[in-house]
Image (cartoon, helix red, strand yellow):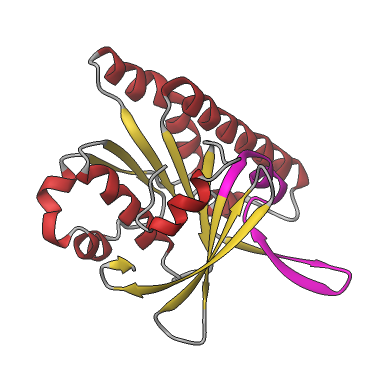
Amino acid sequence: MQFPLTKINEFFKSTGAKEGIASLWGDFGVGKTTLSLQTANIYALNKKKVLYIYTKPNLPFKKISAVFKNNLEDVLEHIIFNHVPNFDDIFNFIFNLEFAVLNDLKTKNVTFNLIIIDSMTDLYRLELNREKKGKNLILNYRLNQLLANLVNLIQKYEVGILIVNEVSRRTQEGQTYEVESGGNVMQYWVTNSIKIERTDVANKRRLILHRGNDNTLFLLNSILTKRGFE
């Protein structure tokens, strides 16, 4: 997978890294959607097809315009935005994706090179209910199915999968720490991840890169502007 920052690409392509589901996660407003749009832009500029699945209430038109400012029309020829409003819809959409989209395009000698899901667990978390453990078990099972299906698409179609995700907080032995939303389910399926954190400087971000296959971490500082990360 190609990211807009050279050091990210160098880290994930170094010895031992492998292709799989990649995740981009962090608190609200740290720049997750901006970095995912920049990633989509890299592919579109190289005339590669991108499917961008957005699950929040409204598409981020201002961010799209800012990131693609100098080449908006050309880029949007290669990016398809799809708005999915609830967990049932995203579940059905992804499970029909191979038949309805990928397989059809392959017969025309065209395929998507990158699929971005922004955000994967927002809708899943809205469905969770502490008082309904049976329902939560079903939701976890369905989330597992979704991620397994995405891995199958990677293997079968050599498509990149980038999941934008949120932070969840756990308390253990009196200490609270941050994990990727979806917990153990996401940890099992995600190969490489990027966590974005704020710093003491308003527009400066810390990126924590995690290569899951060998549990290697790498820290990277970046500046977030209206056009994206630099």
- 227 in relation to 191, above or below: below
From the top left corner, tell me how far across and down residue 132 is, in percent. Answer: 74, 48
Q: Is 185 in the magenta?
A: yes
| Residue range (magenta) | 169-192
The quadrant in which the N terminus is found is top left
From the top left corner, tell me how far across and down residue 7 is, in percent. Answer: 44, 58
* Farthest right residue in view: 173
The quadrant in which the C terminus is found is bottom left
Is any part of residue 1 visible from this angle? yes
User: Based on the displayed image, in which of its 4 quarters is residue 79 positioned?
Assistant: top left
* Farthest front residue in view: 15
- 161 in relation to 169, above or below: above
Q: Is 102 in the magenta?
A: no
From the top left corner, tell me how far across and down residue 186 is, in percent. Answer: 64, 45
**Would residue 31 appear left or right of 59 to someone viewing this image?**
right
From the top left corner, tell me how far across and down residue 229 is, in percent. Answer: 35, 67
**Would residue 184 appear left or right of 85 to someone viewing this image?**
right
Look at 46% across and 51% down and name the residue there.
Answer: 10
Look at 35% across and 62% down and name the residue there.
Answer: 34
